[in-house]
């Protein structure tokens, strides 16, 4: 391991720790119906959502009603996402002319189920399959609402710990609206603006054909990527705008964009741990949970980073040095982007699997056996470390 790599990981963890408490307090206030600094700006939008949806803000639900609402919402989201994919050929914002031939019934079903459940498993390449409208109206919308539904269920669980004699655990529709309006929208907007400033593309232009230095023709894709990347990281979604996810320079072009995208993976999961402490009126419990999962996370990061920085033992037998120098990062760089390096790749790999995010900035299959064991272990534990 290098000093720079250790510093990058340490800096990330300190920033995450510093943001967890204020965000956790903010989320507790939002879901307890208390006033926040965003209320003067976003309260009208919240009220509009209630009026349009016919939602009674002060009406609470029994746990069976809450569960039924979650399932009904999921069904509507599935149908909405499926139909947009199947009908993308007659919908606007489709400069490449993608149609039902690209989004076959089985693929559309797969994608709709995946995004509706916040799984975001992808069996397609976004830039050769989906129109801009489908990416925005179907997938980006699902990135918001599926994450909001998950947060709502987490908040309902916290209420179950705190309420002793009650028949209700809140209102799913109110919790979901508040999660979108006060939490996901502001953070996603800020993240999208930052990513756009870093060079993540955001346009509706047709794909460009260019001639390479070798004389070959290459197609350069476009699209509204920045607005989708921000929420796919923030909401533990992970499904990329492009086929290679955040290894693609149009999704993740700089060190700064890489840091923000990695931070967004764990920001809300870490904050929710403190929210739990606030809502049960014992913040020590929140810190206890944070310490437990944080320790597991750090152990995983440094095992993964250490294994990757040590390099490929097979290459070492051939006399190829894996030593880091001023001119090269050393270690196992197979499947990793030079602009990210080994430390940031290992950090992302552990974070994305700890939170069930699924986005990547390197190819985990190219990791060393020990380095790849950590993401695989995180996947097998099922969101125990931070979760998503």
Image (cartoon, grey):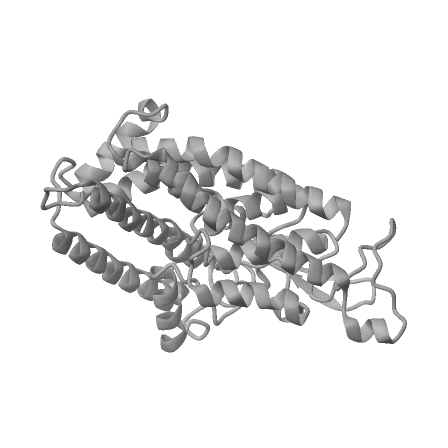
- Is 44 situated left or right of 225 in this image? left
Instruction: Determine the residue positioned at 56% across, 57% down.
Output: 350
**Could you say which is closer to the camera, residue 329 or residue 70?**
329
Q: Position of residue 374 (x, y in %)?
A: 57, 63
Is residue 317 among the parts visible in the rendering? yes
Q: Could you tell me residue 339's position as x and y percent?
A: 73, 51
Q: Name the residue: 54% across, 68% down.
A: 376
Residue 312 sits in quarter: bottom right
Q: In this view, does 317 lie to the left or right of 64?
A: right
Residue 204 point in image, percent of width and height: 52, 50
* Position in image of residue 143 (x %, y %): 40, 53
Judge whether 383 appears above or below 48 on screen.
Answer: below
- 115 and 274: which is toward the camera: 274
Considering only vertical position in the picture, is 221 above or below 167? below
Q: Is residue 95 above or below residue 37?
A: below
For image coordinates 42% across by 34% down, the residue present is 23
Image side of residue 367 versus residue 325, left or right: left
- Regarding residue 184, the answer to whether it shows in the image is no
Residue 94, compared with residue 182, is above or below; it is: below
Residue found farthest to the right: 319
Q: Quadrant of residue 9?
A: top right
170 or 227: nearer the viewer:
170
């Amino acid at each position: 391991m290098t000093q720079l790599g250790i510093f990058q990981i340490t800096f990330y963890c300190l920033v995450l720790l510093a943001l967890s408490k204020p965000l956790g307090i903010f989320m507790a206030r939002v879901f307890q119906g208390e006033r926040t600094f965003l209320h003067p700006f976003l309260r009208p939008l919240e009220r509009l959502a209630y009026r349009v949806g016919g939602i009674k803000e002060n009406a609470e639900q029994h746990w069976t009603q809450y569960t039924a609402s979650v399932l009904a919402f999921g069904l509507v989201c599935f149908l909405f996402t499926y139909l947009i994919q199947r009908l993308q050929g007659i919908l606007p914002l489709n400069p490449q002319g993608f149609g039902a031939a690209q989004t076959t019934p089985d693929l559309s079903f797969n994608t709709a189920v995946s995004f509706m459940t916040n799984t975001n498993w992808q069996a397609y390449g976004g830039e050769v399959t989906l129109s801009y409208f489908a990416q925005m109206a179907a997938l980006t919308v699902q990135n918001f609402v599926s994450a909001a539904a998950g947060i709502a269920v987490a908040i309902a669980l916290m209420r179950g710990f705190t309420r002793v004699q009650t028949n209700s655990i809140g209102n799913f529709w109110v919790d979901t609206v508040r999660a979108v309006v006060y939490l996901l929208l502001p953070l996603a907007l800020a993240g999208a603006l930052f990513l756009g400033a870093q060079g993540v593309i955001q346009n509706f232009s047709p794909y460009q054909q260019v001639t390479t230095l070798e004389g070959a023709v290459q197609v350069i894709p476009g699209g509204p990527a920045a607005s989708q990347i921000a929420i796919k990281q923030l909401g533990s979604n992970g499904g990329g705008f492009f086929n290679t996810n955040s290894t693609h320079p149009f999704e993740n072009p700089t060190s700064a964009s890489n840091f923000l995208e990695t931070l967004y993976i764990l920001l809300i999961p870490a904050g929710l741990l403190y929210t739990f402490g606030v809502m049960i009126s014992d913040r020590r419990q929140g810190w206890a949970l944070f310490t437990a999962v944080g320790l597991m996370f750090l152990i995983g990061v440094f095992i993964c980073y250490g294994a990757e920085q040590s390099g490929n033992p097979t290459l070492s037998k051939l006399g190829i040095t894996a030593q880091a120098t001023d001119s090269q990062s050393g270690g196992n760089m197979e499947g990793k982007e030079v602009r990210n390096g080994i430390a940031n790749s290992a950090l992302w790999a552990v974070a994305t699997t700890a939170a069930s995010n699924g986005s990547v900035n390197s190819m985990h299959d190219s990791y060393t056996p020990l380095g790849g064991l950590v993401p695989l272990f995180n996947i097998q534990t099922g969101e125990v470390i931070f979760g998503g």
